Image: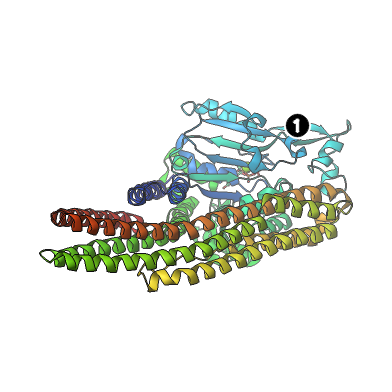
Amino acid sequence: MSVHLEQEVADFSERRLRLATAITDYADWLDRQHGIDAERTLRLADTASGLRHDKLVVAFVAEFSRGKTELINALFFADHGQRLLPSDAGRTTMCPTELSYSADEAPSLSLLPIETRRRGDSLARLKHMPIEWCRVSLDPTDPRQLQESLKKLTETKAMPAVDAIELGLWSSEDESERHQLRPDGTVEVPAWRYAMVNYPHPLLQAGLTILDTPGLNALGAEPELTLSVIPNAHAVMYLLATDTGVTRSDLEIWQKHVHRHANYHVAVLNKIDMLWDELKSDAEVQATIERQAEETARVLKLPRSRVFTVSAQKALAATIRGDGALRVRSGIEALEYLLAHQVIPARRDMLYHAVSREVNALLDESRVDLAARLKRSSDELIQLTQLSGKNRELIEQTRTKLQQEKDSYDATAEQFRITRRMVQAQGDHLLSQLSDETLGDICKAGREALEGSWTTRGLTSGIRQLSGQMVDRIQQATQLADNMLDALDQAYIRFHRVHHLPKMQVPRLDLNAYRNRLEALTRETEAFCRDPANLMLEKRFMIRRFYAGLAEEARKAFSLARVEAERWLRIALDPVMTRIREHKQYLDTRLANLQRILENMGTLHSRMAQIKDEIGRLRHDKTELARIAGQLTA
Ligand SMILES: Nc1nc2c(ncn2[C@@H]2O[C@H](COP(=O)(O)OP(=O)(O)OP(=O)(O)O)[C@@H](O)[C@H]2O)c(=O)[nH]1
Ligand SMILES: [Mg+2]
């Protein structure tokens, strides 16, 4: 592991935590201002927790034996002085393997039995069911035990062919798989469906998650991996090997699972050491490697700069042996540089962008509120200064004027209450568009449409219907939200124009991300159905599983849209209500004070002193807010 990479990941993690602390400070600041404001505090706590637990996911994808595991060993685990994860000729890694670290659990290897494929539960859900997993403790201080335990990742077992067909692990119609059938009617299948390694490596501790995947067949059999896990990775390293070049199945993986997805991906042409030839000059060897890299770029339709040439095996050996020259020759440093200086900064920027979008609107609101309070206090102070030494009559006049202002304010507030009730009713209607019940109905209808028609055509129309209905509901909800906001804006304008409350700045409800996700799922389905490999009869099981995977993803998008809408409803209404209430309190207090002064002129000066204190406090809050804002935008 290079110093660069370790440093970048550590810096990133440190800045992430600093930002999370600033957000928590801000939540405390807000609480001091308004008393506990549960919604905002919760929202900020969510954001801070998201930052603290953020994971940078790098996935390694390729056909079997291209050297994914060897490259992971070389990039991340060479410091162990050995090959930590099992890598060998032929199919080795039998199940997708996620490496990360959580301090909440002891170092361990968790394995999900392959039979869980029979159940409808998604991987995401199964991850929260510890009982389903077999756990092996890992001892980070004992390399031998580690290496021995991790061999489980390569385990296979015999399974009756009928069961293997049902689990989508084998197909008798597939020419290339038929010979695997043994005389006793069994076939060899992976023992595990998914593995999670919880290991206290510095990079993993700093928030890196590595995903090692098995080759094409295993990849295609787990829709969740291809629909959600790989597309959601922040970077995908796609491997090829110099000895095999770009084969048909390499290209299939590339086109189906890597190239189409928008996330950051590069191609790694591995095993360049196989082209090292002592009878050729360095320049000749280099030219051969370059030719192959250019050819790879051409076939994959990638710029040449996105194709890296490495020897994972030599990089691992060089790091273990401390052979600097071999390490340079292995080409590994360019990949480390890429991770340290492109992948990590890109994630950092994205995360910061999301956080600042979330926090900036709140900060603006806080600034505006604070300025309004300061202005009110200084207005009152100026008025009292002018009144001091004046006669009762003048004070009486001021009080009458203030009373009129308050009466007019109360009338506005009363009118506003009607709008508020109406808007709240619309809010309930909005939520019903996105309710669990609606979701259940849509899913039920989608499934019924598909029953008895487990064909690719049935699947396409089923998923179109499912996603179409969900998109409709999302659009209706957005429209309702826009109407509500317009009504609210109309009603609020009087507060701004007549009573000089700050302008209303509620953001619009934006559910586009979820709509896009649903539309993307429909496109995925159409691509799946166009694929001749999925048209075979036995693939009915595949279709069922694919539909289950899709429906789960669609459900997720829909539920997230609801959470977002609920949140929006609260942030659209609550701050406006708080502001209106606070202004009323302010007018009440001011009136009561004038009354007290009228009753006893001596209290005028003590009230002035009070306001001066208040202004001092507000100024202090302002400085504090500026400090927090500085941290948040640094
Ligand atoms: N010569 C050479 N061999 C390599 C290199 N990288 C990996 N190998 C060998 O290629 C074989 C496959 O490597 P793995 O790391 O197991 O490949 P994989 O992509 O993880 O394969 P699966 O786990 O089966 O999907 C092993 O025998 C490695 O030692 C390399 O850079 N040069
Ligand atoms: Mg492997």
Residue 530 visible? The answer is yes
Q: Quadrant of residue 341?
A: bottom left
**Image side of residue 261 versus residue 15, left or right:** right
Residue 626's x, y, as percent? 28, 58
Residue 216 visible? The answer is no
Q: Reply above or below: 70 against 443.
A: above
Out of 157 and 502, give the one closest to the viewer: 502
Q: Residue furthest left?
A: 389
Out of 518 and 78, give the one closest to the viewer: 518
- Colour scheme of this structure image? rainbow
Residue 303's x, y, as percent? 56, 67
Q: Residue at x 56, y 66 (%)?
A: 484
Out of 178 and 112, give the one closest to the viewer: 112
| Image quarter for ligand 2 | top right
Q: Reply above or below: 186 against 397.
A: above
Residue 632's x, y, as percent? 35, 55
Q: Residue at x 33, y 68 (%)?
A: 404
The amino acid pointed to by label 1 is Lys
Q: Residue furthest bottom?
A: 497
Query: The C terminus lies in which quarter of the figure?
Result: bottom left
Q: To which residue does mark 1 refer? A: 157
Q: Quadrant of residue 258?
A: bottom right
**Image side of residue 338 versus residue 302, left or right:** left
Q: Residue at x 66, y 44 (%)?
A: 214
Query: The N terminus lies in which quarter of the figure?
Result: top left
